[in-house]
Amino acid sequence: MKAGEIVKVLEDFAPCSIQESWDNSGFIIGNEGAEVKSVLLALDCTPAVIEEAIESGTDMIITHHPLIFSPLKRITGSGIVEKMVERSIKNNLIIYSIHTNIDKVISGVSGLMAENLGLCNVRLLSKEENDNFGLGVIGEFKGRLDFQEVVSLVKEKFSVKNIRCSRPIDKKIKKVALCGGSGSSLISAAKDSGAQIFITGDLKYHDFLCEDGFMVMDIGHFESETGVLELLRSILLKNLVTFAVRISENNNNLIYYY
C-alpha cells in the first residue's frame, strides 16, 4: 500500500490544510509514493520509537507531535533531532505527523478528553471561519461536582498522579472547557464561554491567577493527549481492515516526575 493511501484516510478525518500556521504536520521524512506494509503509532518520535520500528520491520511511523518543528539548516548528527532524521533516512522509514489538524476537529484530541470525562452538550470552544474546525471544546457534567470530585475524576480518567491548579472555586462545577496539549492561549476564551474550569496542559505560573468563579487545571501535556493514538488506530483499522497498525511500546512521557 502507498503511504499516500494511508495518509488520505487520516486527512479525510482531519485535513492537513487546517493545521496551525506554525505547525509542521504532514510528511516529515519520505513521501506519499513510498510502499508501506505496516505502521507504528506514537505521540512523539523518539530514538526508542525509531529503533522499535527498525527492529520490527515497520515501514512507517505516524506521530502526533512532528519530529521537525524548526527548520534544520544542516544534518550533521550533532543533535538528537538530526540523529533521528539521519537514522530514519538510512533505514528508509516514512515519518508522518498529524498534529494541530487533529486537535481542531471536534472528535479529535479535545473531544476525546470530553468523552473521557463523560461530558454532554460538547461543542468547539474557539471556532474558525469554518464552524467545523476550531481549538478546544466546552461541555457539561451530567450533574454538578464539587472540586474534589473533579480532581478524583480527572486523576482516574487521565492516569494523572499530580495536578496543578489555581485556587479552587467554592461552587459546584457544571461547565467545563478543555484543550489537549498546550492550551494557555485559550484561557480567555474558556472564561468568556462561561466555563467554571479550564483543563489543559503546559500552563505557566501567571496563568494560575484567575478571577472569582473561574479556575484552571494543568494535567500535563502528555496526559491530555494519549487518547489520540487509540483514535488514530481505530480510524486506520476501520478503513484499512487488513492493514497492520499498532501503538508503540515506547510511547512514554518525555517528562519524568520524582
Image: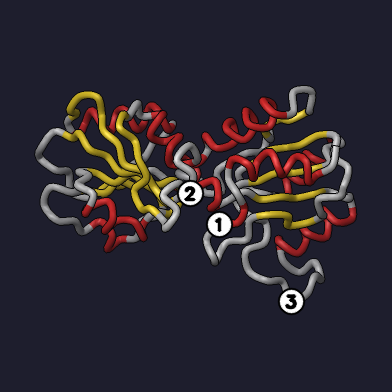
Q: Where is residue 56 in the image (x, y as percent from the top left)?
A: 84, 34
Query: Which residue is at a point 52% across and 60% down the rendered structure image?
Result: 20
Task: Give above or below for 175 relative to 186.
Answer: above
Query: Which residue is at a point 81% across and 34% down the rendered structure image?
Result: 38
CA distance separating discs 2 and 3:
30 Å
The reply, left or right, for residue 2 in relation to residue 116 is right
Q: Position of residue 27 (x, y in %)?
A: 73, 55
The quadrant in which residue 184 appears is: bottom left
Q: Which of marks 3 and 1 is nearer the N terminus?
A: 1
Amino acid type, label 2: Lys
Describe the element under mark 3 as helix, strand or loop. loop
Which of the image's four quarters has the N terminus?
Answer: top right
Q: How crowded is mark 1: few (under 14 residues within 10 Å), some or many (20 or more)?
A: many
Amino acid type, label 1: Gln
Task: Give above or below for 192 relative to 5.
Answer: below
List the residue tagged with mark 3: 73
Query: Could you tell me if the residues under marks 2 and 1 are in contact, i.e. CB atoms within 8 Å?
Result: yes
Residue 254 in sight from this viewpoint: yes
List the residue tagged with mark 1: 19
Which of the image's four quarters has the C terminus?
Answer: top left
Describe the element under mark 2 as helix, strand or loop. loop
Query: Which residue is at a point 55% across and 55% down the rendered structure image?
Result: 18
List the residue tagged with mark 2: 104
Amino acid type, label 3: Lys
Q: Residues within 10 Å of mark 3 (few under 14, many from 20)?
A: few
Farthest bottom residue?
73
The reply, left or right, for residue 90 in relation to residue 201 is right
Q: Which of marks 2 and 3 is nearer the N terminus?
A: 3
